[in-house]
Image (spheres, helix red, strand yellow):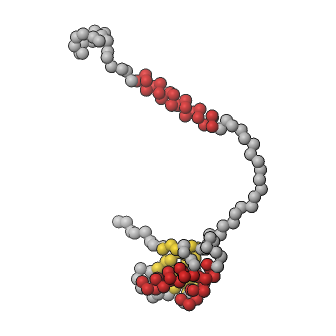
Amino acid sequence: MSIGSEYESDGGVVNEINMTPLIDVMLVLLIIFIVTLPVINGAVKVDLPKAVNKPVETVSRNVDISIDAAGTIYWDKIPTPMVKLNSKVAVAAAVGEANAPTVRIYADRNVRYDVVANVLSALQNGGLGKIDFVTDLPQTQ
């Protein structure tokens, strides 16, 4: 430690650590690790066996049910009365619960609630439980 004023520059001992060389060394080590790590991970050569397999066929079918403001129900854009809706739901649910289609409901904002409730009840009673309600994004200003 030097004796005297800290403003004098007579070559006295400095009691602070210069961090610049330490930071330089750390950055060089970091670059070395970044460069060598991918080489180390890819160094193991493995001869993997070849297998012939049939891809699993998953049919992800969607059913679109639209309900306009007048209460008309459309099954994949085909007008369907409520009596025929129950039979179409039964046919769609006959493939099994694991392969059952997802039902997307497009209901007009002015449709009566009881029409949508009846459609939901028919879907649930028929065995279709995967139901999505489709909406529009709100307009941003």
Image side of residue 107 versus residue 44, left or right:
left
Q: Which corner quadrant of the image does residue 34 belong to?
A: top right
Residue at position x 36%, y 20% in the image: 17
- Residue 125: x percent and y percent? 54, 82
- Residue 15: x percent and y percent? 31, 17
Image side of residue 6 versus residue 22, left or right:
left
Q: Quadrant of the C terminus?
A: bottom left
The relative height of residue 74 versus residue 5 in the rendered view (above or below) is: below
Q: Which corner quadrant of the image does residue 8 belong to?
A: top left
Q: Which corner quadrant of the image does residue 137 belong to?
A: bottom left
Among all residues in the image, which is located at the extreme left? 5
Residue at position x 65%, y 76% in the image: 95
The answer to which of 109 and 3 lies nearer the viewer is: 3
Q: Quadrant of the N terminus?
A: top left
The relative height of residue 134 versus residue 6 in the rendered view (above or below) is: below
The number of numbered badges drawn on the structure is: 0
Residue at position x 39%, y 24% in the image: 19
